[in-house]
Amino acid sequence: MAFESHKKIGDLSKNHNSSELHPQSQLVPYRANCNSFPIQKSSSHRKSHFKQPLNQNPKVIPSKSILKSKEPEPNSRNTGSATPNATYQSFTDLPSAVICEILKCLDPKELGIVSCVSTQLNNLISDLHGWKKFYFDRWGPPSLPVDPQNEKPSWKEMFVERDFRAKSFMGRFTMDTLHGHTEAVRSVFVLVSAKLIFTGGYDYVVRMWDLEEGFSIGASRSLGCTIRAISADSDLLVAGGTDAFIQCWKAVEGNPHLFGLTSSNSNSNFEFRLWGHEGPITCLGLDSMRIYSGSWDMTVRVWDRSSMECVTKLRHRDWVWALCPRGNTVAVTAGKNLYIWEISTGEPLGLVLNPHKGNAYALARSHTGDLVFSGGEDGTIHMYDLNTRSDLVISSMWAPHTGAVNSLSFEYPWLVSCSTDGRIALIDVRKLVVSRKNNSESRARTVASGAGDIEPPQRMLHGFGCNLFSADVGWDRIVCAGEEGVVRVWNFSQAIEMERRARALRSVRLENRMRRKKVQMEMMNGGTGGGPHCAAVLKKNALNGERNGVWHSKRGVGGKLKA
């Protein structure tokens, strides 16, 4: 392991200045400031991974000073505490708190490799609080509730399971078709925490579906306008349409489906409207404190959830098509441009002019907000990595569609897009995301319009033959809807298990094929080393019948029948 050094490093002289230490010596400045670490000695003398000794002059390499430590004075007492000149034989000799702080600098893949080195490191990595940060950075708080009867898994187990389930989108699937809307569906939203699907469209109603079973739970009363945007969390459901108002439903305590959409009498405590826009509402967003709405009146309004009043208005020069809030910023596509706004001050932080050939209809962001995706009228998708650069420069580009990209949805590591060409594209961004430890080096590249710089999608789902207006991804399902008025749910929950069974069957068939080939080779070689085995095979074939034999042929059977 690259962290260990099993040689005994010699003590520094008292007159040695700490500022003159060689840059490759990482542990000595730390030892000089710690006086309470126990001295641990080892009798092993393995090769050291330090290329140069701790010496004032890095060019001079003494022959014995590195291998021998300074002998203690006869009058010195063994007090059990480390001195400033204490030596550590390996990385694991450091205190656990120090090792944990160092391990926090590694990414999940590197932590998995380090955990295989020793039992001590495996135990430290399993209990490391950094797994919670890794989980939240990728997916946010856990979407599915934990069963109270079962023991709550550790953050490492939750991370590993979620990361493993992300592979299911490359496996087999089943598709459910949900019928209920009478006209085209414009908006789809998946609330994974409650296992619900919300849809709305040209028939003026908002419908609620069960994500697991696929049946309709209920529908709202007619809102009198086309529903173009829906967003929800566990406390609030909002829908916006062409009549410039935001319809809101609060969660009802004790309701197993959270919201009472089917109630005939509207209760002002649980159902109300927000007015303020002067044009059709095209996009909505929620966080824990605010409601975000974008409209064709060229504004994005920010509403306070406690007072339900508009607190900020962000003005643009064209129609607002999509928005995506993260933290204290909100990304907006208006007309052909992409904006990044700071919510508290109302000032723009970034602007991309004409990223697509035509309007930019779709927008998505990672949970931390570092990755921004935009989809345009030209059928291309752009990715902007804010980890590598402060300005908005395209780091990757895809062109999976022949029509306009109407919707984008992101759940690490999959980006899902739908288009007017009736196809869904699945894009894995893991290999394209720059590691956080290399943030100091700008590795973003400007993507030209040439085909060689366009990344291919990992999977395409097609066969609809009509325009797709909206798509959303949640856990192991993809939900989409479009012009035909039917909601489709792509279920990948059994993909991993089905792939395991398929691999097991393939391995059995391959093993049988190799066994038959081996027997054939032994029979062709005559009696060289395989006589008893061949005799046993012949006896077995005779018992099982000639048709099950290895050397079965129609000519042979015909000859025996004639005889």
Image (spheres, grey):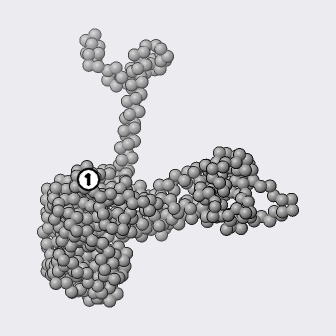
Residue 139 figure quarter:
bottom left
Q: Name the residue under label 1.
A: 454
The 10 Å Cα crowd at callout 1, few under 14, some 14 to 19, many 20 or more, is: some
Residue shown at 41%/28% (left/top)?
A: 515
Percent x, y for residue 264? 21, 83
Up-down relation of residue 24 to residue 79 (above or below) = above
Residue 14 figure quarter:
bottom right
Residue shown at 34%/25% (left/top)?
A: 548
Instruction: Tell me if residue 499 can be seen.
Output: yes
Residue type, mark 1 in image: Ile
Percent x, y for residue 49? 61, 49
Percent x, y for residue 425? 25, 56
Residue shown at 57%/51% (left/top)?
A: 2
Quadrant where the C terminus is found in the figure? top left
Residue 384 figure quarter:
bottom left
Looking at this view, is 207 or 384 the one in front?
Answer: 384
Q: Is mark 1 on a helix, strand or loop?
A: loop
Which residue is situated farthest in the right direction here?
A: 75
